[in-house]
Image: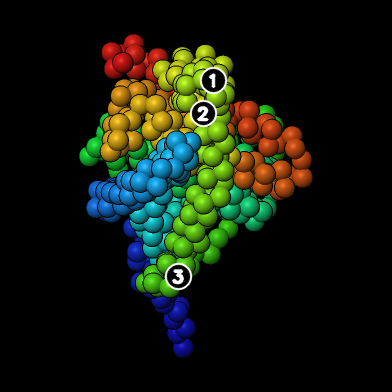
C-alpha cells in the first residue's frame, strides 16, 4: 500500500500572512498602514470633529466670561477661570476627538490580530539592534501610553532585553503628545498632518533603535535572545473590544485633564500673576523669572522665550500640560478676545521653530508617571534619573540640530 503524506491545510490567515509578513514587504506595508491611520486621525479627528470641540470650548468660555462680568466677579477670578481653566485645560480637552479617533483605529488593528504580526515582521530588524520582536510589542503599546509599554517589558525573557526596552520606550510618541503636535500642525502645516505625524513617530522609532544598539554594546552586553511567538488568527474586530480598548486609553487622558493638568495649569497661573507688584503674565512675574532663567538652554533650538521654555518643563508632570500652559500664558498676555490658540502660536513661532519644538517634545524627558514606573520596575532610583537626563539631552540635541541645519539651509 502507498501511504500518502497528509496535505498541509492552508488557512485564510496563512494566505494573508504570505503577503503581510513577507520578508521584503512586511515593514513597508506596516508603514503604509500607519500612515493611513495618522491621515485618518487628522481628517476625522481634527478637521471634522476637532473644530466642533474647539467651538464648544470657546463658546463655553464666552458664556462663562459674560456671566462672571455680569455678577461683578473679581478680576482674579475671571482671569483664573478664563485664562487658566478655559484656555489652559480647555486647550487640552479640545483634542479629545483627535485622540479618540487614533485609539479607535489602533484598537481595530490590535483586535484584528495585525499588531502581533507587526512584531513578527520587525523581528529581523530588531535583532540587528540587539533586541527581539517582542520588544516591538512594548514599543507599539507605548504609542498609547509609555507606562503600560514599560510594564509590558516584564514578558521579555532576559534582563538585558527588559532594561533596554524600558529605556527606549519613552521615544515612542504617546497619545499625550498628540495635542502638542496637533496645535503646531494646524498652525503651520495644515493638510500635511498625517505625513508629519507619521514622520515624528518614525523618528521616535529610529532614535529608539539607535539607542538600543548603543545600550546593547555598552550598558548591557550579552547574547541576543530569540523570538518565538504564535501568531493569532485574523478575526473581525468586535465593537465591544475596540470600544473597551479605546475607553481605557481615553479615560486616562480625560482623568489627567481633570486632575494633573488642572493642578499644573493652576500652579502655573498662580506663578504667572504673582507678585502683585508685577504685571500679570509678564517677564517680571515669578513664572516669567523662572522662564527667563531657562531661556539660554533653548535659544540654540530657536524657541528661547520664557513662555515656551516654561511650557516644556510644565510637560514633565504630564505632557498635555504643554498645550495647557501655552494656552494660559498666551491668553493672559497676547491673545485678544475670541482669538484661537493656533493664531497665537503663529505669532510666536516659525515653521522651523515649530518643527524643532515638536522634535523636542517627541524626545525629551518623559512624564512623571513614566519615570515612576521605571523606578518601580527596576527597584532603583538610578534608572529613572538616568532616563530623565539622557532623554532630555537627546531631545535638546535633536531640536538644536533641526533648527541650526534648517537655518543654514535658509528655512529660518
Query: Under tag 2, what secondary structure?
Result: helix
- The dot on residue 196 is none
Residue 75 against residue 116 in the figure, above or below: above
Residue 38 against residue 382 in the figure, above or below: below
Question: Which residue was labeled with disc 1?
Answer: 277
Foreground tag (2 vs 3): 2
Question: Which residue was labeled with disc 2?
Answer: 273
User: Residue 298: horizontal and vertical position, in percent?
Assistant: 49, 18
Query: Under tag 1, what secondary structure?
Result: loop
Foreground tag (1 vs 3): 1
- Left or right of 42? Residue 121 is right
Task: Locate the C terminus by quadrant.
Answer: top left
User: Residue 9: horizontal and vertical position, in percent?
Assistant: 41, 76
Q: Could you tell me how many numbered marks the image carries?
A: 3
Residue drawn at (48%, 36%) of the image: 76
Tell me whether the residue at label 2 lies in contact with that at label 3, contact meaning CB atoms closer than 8 angstroms.
Answer: no
Q: CA distance from mark 1 to mark 2?
A: 9 Å
Residue 303 against residue 242 in the figure, above or below: above
Foreground residue among 278 and 164:
278
Q: Residues within 10 Å of mark 1 (few under 14, many from 20)?
A: few
Residue drawn at (58%, 53%) of the image: 148
Question: Which residue was labeled with disc 3?
Answer: 241
Instruction: Name the residue at the right extreme.
Output: 379
User: Residue 269: horizontal and vertical position, in percent?
Assistant: 51, 34
Residue drawn at (52%, 44%) of the image: 261
Amino acid at each position: 500500500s502507498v501511504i500518502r503524506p497528509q496535505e498541509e491545510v492552508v488557512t485564510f490567515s496563512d494566505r494573508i500572512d504570505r503577503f503581510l509578513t513577507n520578508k521584503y514587504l512586511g515593514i513597508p506595508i506596516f508603514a503604509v498602514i500607519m500612515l493611513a491611520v495618522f491621515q485618518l486621525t487628522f481628517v476625522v479627528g481634527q478637521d471634522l470633529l476637532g473644530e466642533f470641540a474647539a467651538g464648544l470650548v470657546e463658546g463655553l468660555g464666552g458664556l462663562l466670561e459674560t456671566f462672571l462680568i455680569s455678577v461683578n466677579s473679581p478680576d482674579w477670578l475671571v482671569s483664573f477661570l478664563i485664562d487658566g481653566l478655559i484656555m489652559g485645560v480647555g486647550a487640552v480637552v479640545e483634542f479629545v476627538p483627535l485622540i479618540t479617533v487614533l485609539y479607535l483605529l489602533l484598537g481595530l488593528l490590535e483586535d484584528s490580530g495585525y499588531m502581533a504580526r507587526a512584531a513578527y515582521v520587525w523581528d529581523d530588524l530588531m535583532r540587528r539592534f540587539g533586541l527581539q520582536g517582542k520588544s516591538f510589542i512594548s514599543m507599539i503599546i507605548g504609542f498609547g501610553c509609555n507606562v503600560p509599554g514599560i510594564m509590558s517589558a516584564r514578558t521579555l525573557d532576559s534582563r538585558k532585553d527588559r532594561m533596554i526596552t524600558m529605556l527606549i520606550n519613552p521615544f515612542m510618541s504617546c497619545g499625550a503628545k498628540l495635542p502638542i503636535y496637533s496645535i503646531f500642525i494646524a498652525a503651520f502645516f495644515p493638510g500635511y498632518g498625517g505625513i508629519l505625524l507619521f514622520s515624528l513617530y518614525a523618528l521616535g522609532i529610529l532614535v529608539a533603535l539607535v539607542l538600543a544598539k548603543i545600550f546593547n554594546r555598552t550598558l548591557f552586553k550579552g547574547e541576543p535572545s530569540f523570538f518565538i511567538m504564535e501568531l493569532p488568527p485574523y478575526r473581525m474586530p468586535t465593537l465591544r473590544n475596540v470600544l473597551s480598548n479605546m475607553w481605557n486609553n481615553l479615560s486616562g487622558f480625560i482623568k489627567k485633564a481633570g486632575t494633573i493638568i488642572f493642578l499644573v495649569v493652576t500652579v502655573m497661573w498662580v506663578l504667572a500673576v504673582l507678585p502683585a507688584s508685577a504685571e500679570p503674565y509678564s517677564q517680571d512675574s515669578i513664572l516669567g523669572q523662572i522662564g527667563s532663567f531657562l531661556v539660554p538652554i533653548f535659544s540654540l533650538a530657536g524657541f528661547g522665550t520664557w513662555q515656551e521654555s516654561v511650557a516644556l518643563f510644565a510637560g514633565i508632570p504630564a505632557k498635555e500640560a504643554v498645550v495647557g500652559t501655552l494656552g494660559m500664558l498666551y491668553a493672559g498676555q497676547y491673545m485678544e478676545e475670541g482669538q484661537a490658540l493656533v493664531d497665537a502660536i503663529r505669532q510666536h513661532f516659525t515653521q522651523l521653530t515649530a518643527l524643532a519644538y515638536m522634535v523636542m517634545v517627541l524626545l525629551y524627558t518623559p512624564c512623571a508617571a513614566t519615570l515612576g514606573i521605571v523606578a518601580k520596575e527596576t527597584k532603583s532610583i538610578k534608572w529613572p534619573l538616568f532616563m530623565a537626563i539622557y532623554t532630555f539631552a537627546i531631545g535638546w540635541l535633536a531640536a538644536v540640530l533641526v533648527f541650526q541645519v534648517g537655518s543654514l539651509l535658509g528655512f529660518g
